[in-house]
Image (cartoon, rainbow, N blue to C red):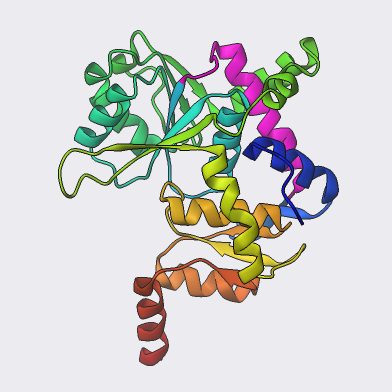
Amino acid sequence: MEIKENTLPKLLRRIASEHANVPAQYSKGKDGKFKEILYKELYANVKDFGAGLIDLGIKRGDHLGLISDNRKEWLVCSMGIMATKSRDIPRGSEATIKDLSYILSFAECKTVVTENKILFNRILECKEGIPTLQNIIIINPSDVDFNNPATTGLNIFSYDEILAKGKDFRQNNPNKIEEIMLSGEEEDSATIIFTSGTTGTPKGVELTHKNFLCQVEDIHKRLPLKQGNKALCMLPVWHVYERELEYFLLYAGVSLCYSKPAISMLLADMKKVSPQFMATVPRIWDGIYTAIYKN
C-alpha cells in the first residue's frame, strides 16, 4: 500500500478512517487489565489535543517539550503537536534537571508536556533556566501540588483540561484543526530529538515528516504485519527506533499495547496480550533469557 500522505497526522487521519473500529491502543487501567482505544477514538483525541493547544496560543513552528515515557497519551500529545504544525522536543523520565534545562531552553520551549509529579517537579526546579517557559501540561496530575509557589508566573493544566479545551474549540471553530493539519508539508519539521549527552552537550537533530514516512513502506515489506495484530510497546519512544516502528504499526493498522521494559512486567504483559510483534534490543532478550533460565 503506497503512502499518499505527506505528514504523519494526515497518515493517521486516513488510517483512522479505514480502520475506525479497530483497536489502535491497549493500555492498562488501575485494575491491571488492558483496555482498548479504537482508531477513530485515537484520531479524535489527537484533534482535541491539537485544538486545545491552539486555544492555548500555540502557533506554527513552536517548540513544545514532551517529557514522558512511552504511554498512550504520548502518541496523542505528539500527533496533536504535529497537527498544529509545531514540533515536539521529546525526552524520557531519565532526563536530569541539567539536561532538561539545557534542552528546553536551547529549543526556546514556551510549553512543556510532562508525565507526572516527579517530572513536573523536575521542570519547576529548572524553570529559571528556561526563560521562555509559560505553560506546563501534566498527563497524570495525581498528587501534583498546583499551588506550589514555584508555579508562580506559569499556567498549569492537566492533559484532560487540554482535551476539554480542544473539544470546546472544535465546536466553536469547526474544521479549524483539520485545516491547519491538512496544510502540512513533507519538509515541515516534525520533531527535534536531542542526543543523550554521554559524549558531551546534547545535540538537537531535526527530523521532518518525510524523514519518518520514507521508511514506513520498506519496513512493511520486511515485517508483514496486518490489521488487528498486536504489538507490545515498551522501549523509550523518544528514541527514533521505537518511534519509527510505532508509525509503521499505525500504518499497518496494528494495535499498540503499552508495557514497561521491566522484565517481570514485560513477561506478564506478553502473557496477557499475546502479541505478534515487539520492538526490542539485546538487553531485553538477555533479561527474558535470564528470567526463563531461573525458572
> For the stretch drawn in magenta, what is the main secondary structure?
helix
Where does the C terminus fall, quadrant-wise? bottom left
In the rendered view, would you say 286 is above or below 17? Answer: below
Instruction: Please state if 293 lies on the left or on the right of 22 as rendered.
Output: left
In the rendered view, would you say 206 is above or below 212? Answer: above
Q: Quadrant of residue 75?
A: top right
What's the residue at 53%, 24% (across, down)? 86
What's the residue at 78%, 42% (across, down)? 14
Q: Position of residue 110 (x, y in %)?
A: 40, 17
Q: Position of residue 13 (x, y in %)?
A: 75, 38
What's the residue at 34%, 38% (across, down)? 118
Instruction: Please state if 91 lies on the left or on the right of 233 as rendered.
Output: left
Please check the rendered image and state whether residue 59 is part of the magenta-colored stretch, yes or no: yes
Q: Nearer the viewer, residue 171 or 29?
A: 171
What count of labels does the image hold? 0
Instruction: Please state if 40 lies on the left or on the right of 295 as rendered.
Output: right
| Residue 28 visible in image | no
Q: Position of residue 20 (x, y in %)?
A: 83, 47
Please check the rendered image and state whether residue 76 is part of the magenta-colored stretch, yes or no: no
Q: Position of residue 285 (x, y in %)?
A: 41, 77
What's the residue at 79%, 19% (across, down)? 175
Q: Nearer the viewer, residue 18 or 119?
A: 18
Q: Quadrant of residue 32?
A: bottom right
Instruction: Please state if 31 lies on the left or on the right of 265 as rendered.
Output: right
Q: Nearer the viewer, residue 137 or 13?
A: 13
| Residue 220 visible in image | yes
Q: Quadrant of residue 180?
A: top right
Where does the N terminus fall, quadrant-wise? bottom right
Span colored in magenta = 38-62
